[in-house]
Image (tube, rainbow, N blue to C red):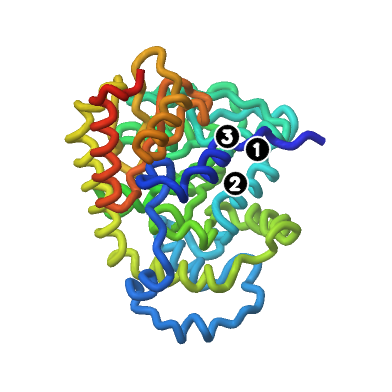
């Protein structure tokens, strides 16, 4: 049996994420170190030392599921399954729902894991371009399974208030399954937390995580929200995979969620500051043709001038400035680059300054 194709972004991330001066290729907040995280959480090292390293409950510890259920309307802890990151949550649901010949639709360009695994399982995928005013009804045409990733990776676009009216109408008529992948829901810059599509109808599921939004990707904690009976089937399949999640990760995830109102203002202020730095400098970045900045999440997807290879541009930017971005070719969309806003503010400013200087020097990209 063949394996899925290479995960295009991973080789580049492995190569540059730890060596660049300014890391704009990551899709999350620059990670905390444990000491700083514990201080922010008012958590002592003694509490960590007293964690029992037994297996956690297969569905996830109850108090964590209870805390997560409070992020949604009309959801109980029984509707939550804790997973090892959202990757496992997605794999479990795809394995349950996608059969050979299943027709699925997704927003394009997209995060590769959202369409690669369904295709690997025998599904027939069709991308629907995510624009400022998308044709939402097109997602539900000739489809058995709809995947909605918002705020969207890589474009940074999000579902607007008027879009929800159309989506809800389509979902209520749709006989198939709808998945809302909501990794950046905590990073809505205009409200405390973004709107969720979880349980808009009995056939709606949602995945979520704290890892990228709170700068703790190494904790590998995710979850899936959905029908209790289906989650029990997924939990049974999970027993063959990771079985349970790490109890230390669960402990820290619970404390992060309980302290989110204290942590998120500083995180969002970082994103806003980096947005302003980029916006002020954008007129001097001559290779960029079109820029649409995000209102949620921390990613966006500027268009390059015609004829510029995204991979070559990303290589030259790293070589000349030690600034790391991901090429659009990694998302199977040439002519764009993906930029993340999660870098530390001082590193971000220095990286953008170097980028501007390079773009306006005799050594600029040609």
Of circles 1 and 3, the one toward us is 3
What residue lies at 59% left-to-right and 82% top-to-bottom? 52
Q: Marks 2 and 1: CB-CB under 8 Å?
A: yes
- Residue 118 in sight in this render: yes
Judge left or right: residue 2 versus residue 151. Answer: right
Q: Marks 2 and 3: CB-CB under 8 Å?
A: no
Q: In the image shown, does 138 or 286 lie closer to the viewer?
A: 286
Q: In the image shown, does 261 or 99 lie closer to the viewer?
A: 261
Tag 1 residue: 117
Judge left or right: residue 281 versus residue 146. Answer: left
Alpha-carbon span between mark 1 and mark 3: 13 Å
Which mark is on residue 46? none
Q: In which quadrant will I find the N terminus?
A: top right
Judge left or right: residue 331 versus residue 36. Answer: right
Q: Quadrant of residue 307?
A: top left
Label 2 crowd (10 A; few <14 / some 14-19 / many >=20)? many
Q: Which sits earlier in the primary sequence, circle 2 or circle 3?
A: 3
What residue lies at 43% left-to-right and 70% top-to-bottom? 34
- In this rendering, is residue 362 above or below 91? above
What residue lies at 52% left-to-right and 30% top-to-bottom? 330
Alpha-carbon span between mark 2 and mark 3: 18 Å
- Residue 164 in sight in this render: no
Dot 1: element: helix
Tag 3 residue: 8
Tag 2 residue: 90
Q: Which sits earlier in the primary sequence, circle 1 or circle 3?
A: 3
Q: In which quadrant will I find the C terminus?
A: top left
- In this rendering, is residue 135 above or below 9? above
């Amino acid at each position: 049996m063949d394996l899925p194709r290479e995960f295009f972004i991973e080789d580049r991330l492995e190569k540059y994420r730890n060596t660049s001066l300014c890391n704009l290729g990551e899709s999350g907040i620059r990670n905390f170190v444990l000491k700083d995280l514990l201080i922010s959480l008012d958590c002592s090292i003694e509490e960590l030392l007293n964690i029992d390293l037994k297996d956690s409950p297969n569905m996830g510890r109850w108090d964590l599921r209870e805390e997560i259920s409070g992020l949604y309307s009309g959801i109980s802890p029984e509707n939550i399954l804790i997973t090892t990151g959202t990757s496992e949550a997605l794999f479990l649901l795809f394995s349950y729902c996608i059969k050979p010949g299943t027709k699925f639709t997704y927003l394009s360009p997209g995060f590769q894991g959202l369409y690669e695994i369904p295709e690997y399982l025998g599904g027939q995928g069709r991308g629907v371009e995510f624009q400022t005013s998308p044709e939402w009804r097109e997602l539900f045409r000739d489809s058995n399974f709809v995947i909605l990733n918002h705020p969207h990776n890589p474009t940074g676009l999000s579902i607007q208030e008027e879009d929800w009216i159309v989506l809800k109408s389509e979902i209520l008529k749709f006989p198939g399954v709808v998945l809302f992948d909501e990794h950046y829901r905590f990073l809505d810059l205009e409200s405390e937390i973004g709107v969720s599509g979880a349980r808009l109808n009995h056939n709606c599921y949602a995945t979520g995580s704290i890892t990228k939004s709170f700068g703790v990707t190494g904790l590998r904690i995710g979850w899936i929200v959905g029908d209790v009976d289906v989650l029990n089937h997924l939990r049974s399949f999970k027993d063959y995979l990771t079985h349970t999640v790490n109890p230390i990760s669960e402990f820290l995830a619970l404390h992060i969620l309980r302290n989110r109102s204290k942590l998120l203002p500083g995180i969002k202020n970082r994103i806003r500051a980096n947005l302003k730095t980029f916006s002020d400098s954008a007129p001097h970045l001559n290779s960029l043709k079109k820029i649409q900045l995000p209102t949620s999440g921390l990613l966006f997807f500027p268009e390059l001038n015609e004829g510029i290879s995204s991979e070559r541009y990303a290589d030259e930017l790293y070589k000349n400035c030690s600034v790391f971005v991901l090429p659009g070719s990694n998302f199977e969309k040439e002519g764009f680059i993906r930029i993340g806003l999660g870098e530390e503010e001082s590193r971000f400013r220095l990286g953008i300054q170097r980028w501007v200087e390079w773009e306006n020097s005799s050594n600029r990209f040609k």
